[in-house]
Image: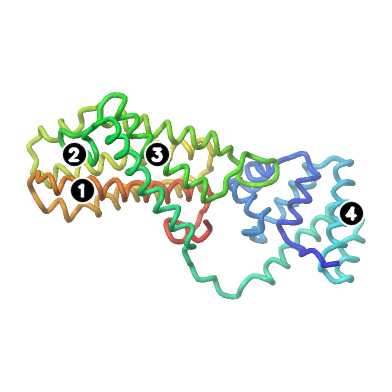
Amino acid sequence: MEKLKFTWGGVLRVIFNSVSKSPAHLAEFYIDRDRTLVYRWMRDEAAPPYKLLPDIIRFVTESSISAERIMLRLEMDAYILSSSLSDEIKEGLSGEEDFEKYITGVLRMALAERRNKSPATPPRITVPLKSIIFALLAAVSGGLIWNVINHLLSLGFYMGGSGNEPIGTLAFVWGLTLGVPVIAFALLSLKAKPTSPVNAPIYDWRLVAAIYSVAAGAVGFIFYNSGFRGFIEGLGYAYGLQEIIIVIVYSALLSFPPLLSVFALLRFQKTGWRLLATIIAAPVLISVLSVLGTALVDRPEPEVAQLRGFLVGLVLRLTMFIAVRIVLSGSQKGFALKALKNM
């Protein structure tokens, strides 16, 4: 019979099957890390540094009563004996009578196995084809849906622009066409399932999708019914500058609140807030960069306005997808390509 791999994630899964405390409890009260990181450990996607071992050992010893320790040892011994470890190591681990020394040896061996089998050089960052497909679908489908709605209802909003923006309930519908495809394809890319006591994701995808979508609809309603464009146009700025200001406010308002709603739902800790600060500015910056060329045409040409609307809509959806995908995956490695490699 084929031997099981003795892994850090396998050891953690045995532990959490036996003790009454959750991975979130370990993350919050013992190691001060985002709880999604613990779930990544359990999936063998990452491993902790050695400096966290004492806190993890303390968690196991303090979170287990006598009966749970007996159950944990039985399950752990069964896992060790069926693993690919050498007979000498199996005997050394299982023969330790003191519980704290026993769990210390098991955890240290699991971490050592993980370190020994890690590649000597970091893997090359690649973007899987499926990630590109989901990102493009998120960026394109919302605009297509909005154009279909305009066609079916004989409306004329399409690409937006001065005097051509939805108001009232239609503004909320427009916000939904922005947010729903973004969150839907982000969740699909993660193969999200309802929350489970052991397996990630640790959020309920239905609640995440609902909150993000409603937030997107709400900010669409607020922006288009606020009269902001009319206010800026009344200040007498040059046309190019006026459009850049509108794009900055537009992209910030439409991308930030939906992302913040999901971020708050997942209750990230301080490391997460640094990540959020990194990706807040991305939709705004990239949206502005995408329209700088059109802003050089310093007059309200309809064709230029249409092009600007298309570029901003496409780029905004794309960056919103990347941002929410990073938050949902709990990646702490930065923005764009580094996070996309884990999709």
The amino acid beneath tag 4 is Asp
Closer mark to the observer between disc 4 and disc 1: 1
Q: Identify the residue at horizontal 14%, vertical 49% (top origin).
A: 304
Q: Is residue 78 left or right of residue 182?
A: right
**Where does residue 58 sit, x and y in percent of width and height?**
75, 48
Q: Work out whether mark 3 precedes mark 1 in sequence or the reverse, and give the earlier one.
A: 3
Circles 2 and 4: CB distance less than 8 Å? no
Q: Give the CA distance from mark 3 to mark 1.
A: 20 Å
**On the image, which quarter does residue 19 sit in?**
top right
Which amino acid does the dot numbered 3 rest on? Gly
Residue 324 on image: x %, y %? 45, 46
- Give left or right: position of 96 versus 271: right
Q: Give the amino acid at mark 1.
A: Arg
Whether label 2 touches label 1, CB < 8 Å: yes
Q: Residues within 10 Å of mark 3 (few under 14, many from 20)?
A: many
Q: Amino acid type of disc 2?
A: Gly
Q: Which mark is residue 308?
A: 1
Say which element carries label 4: loop
Q: CA distance from mark 2 to mark 1?
A: 9 Å
User: Pointer 3: what residue?
Assistant: 179
- Front-most of residues 3 and 116: 3
* Mark seen at residue 98: 4
Q: Counting residues from the N terminus, which is met first, the one under dot 4 or under dot 1?
A: 4
Looking at the rendered image, the quarter that the N terminus falls into is bottom right
